[in-house]
Image (cartoon, grey):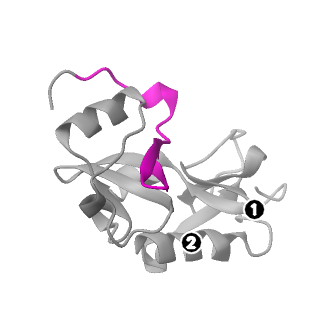
Amino acid sequence: MRRRGTSEVISPPGTKEKVFGYLEERFGLERSLFDDYGLYMASKGRVYLGPRRVPDLPKIATIGLLIARVHGTVKPSTNLLQALGKRVSRNIVNATREQALAYARGGDFKPDSAAVDGIGDGYVLVRFEGASLGCGLLQKGMVKNMLPKAKRLELRYI
């Protein structure tokens, strides 16, 4: 969100700390990764990461990469986890081939207990053979698919 007539980033008090604190604690993404960027708030709790300064014209509807939604808690976006997945060091579920195919279609899956050993319930990065597929929600040993419908694919080969 910007003040009219300026190019400064504005966000509700504490939002930046809440989002970056969560990403650091849950995924090991250091805050310094985001030092050169601005944080922008949009409707429905959407948080965007973009340039520190933006031009006043033309009118911009959204700017940057959607990185999270904030509604009491922080939900990381699939965009963020796909873009920075190589830097994520915690709460990673490594999917099997069959699980990755199901996930790409939009399905939930039950990972092997070894794949979730030491991971508490909450949002996780779903990976397959080093590729960051996106966001999942680990609950009671199941990974609930958080992949947006527009990003789902009917894969035959991986």
Q: Relative to 93, is 18 above or below?
A: below
The structure residue drawn at horizontal position 48% and vertical position 26%, both measured from the top left corner, is 150
**Which amino acid lies under the numbered mark 1 shown in the image of this protein?**
Gly
The structure residue drawn at horizontal position 82% and vertical position 56%, both measured from the top left corner, is 5
Residue span colored magenta:
136-155
The residue that label 2 is drawn on is: 22
Label count reads 2
**Which amino acid lies under the numbered mark 2 shown in the image of this protein?**
Tyr
Q: Relative to 13, is 126 above or below?
A: above
Q: Residues within 10 Å of mark 2 (few under 14, many from 20)?
A: some
The structure residue drawn at horizontal position 66% and vertical position 73%, both measured from the top left corner, is 18
Visible residue check, residue 36: no
Position of the C terminus, as image quadrant, is: top left
- Corner quadrant of residue 52: bottom right
- Numbered badge on residue 72: 1
Q: Nearer the viewer, residue 143 or 70?
A: 143
Q: Nearer the viewer, residue 120 or 28?
A: 120
Q: Residues within 10 Å of mark 1 (few under 14, many from 20)?
A: few
Residue 55 percent location from the top left of the image: 65, 51
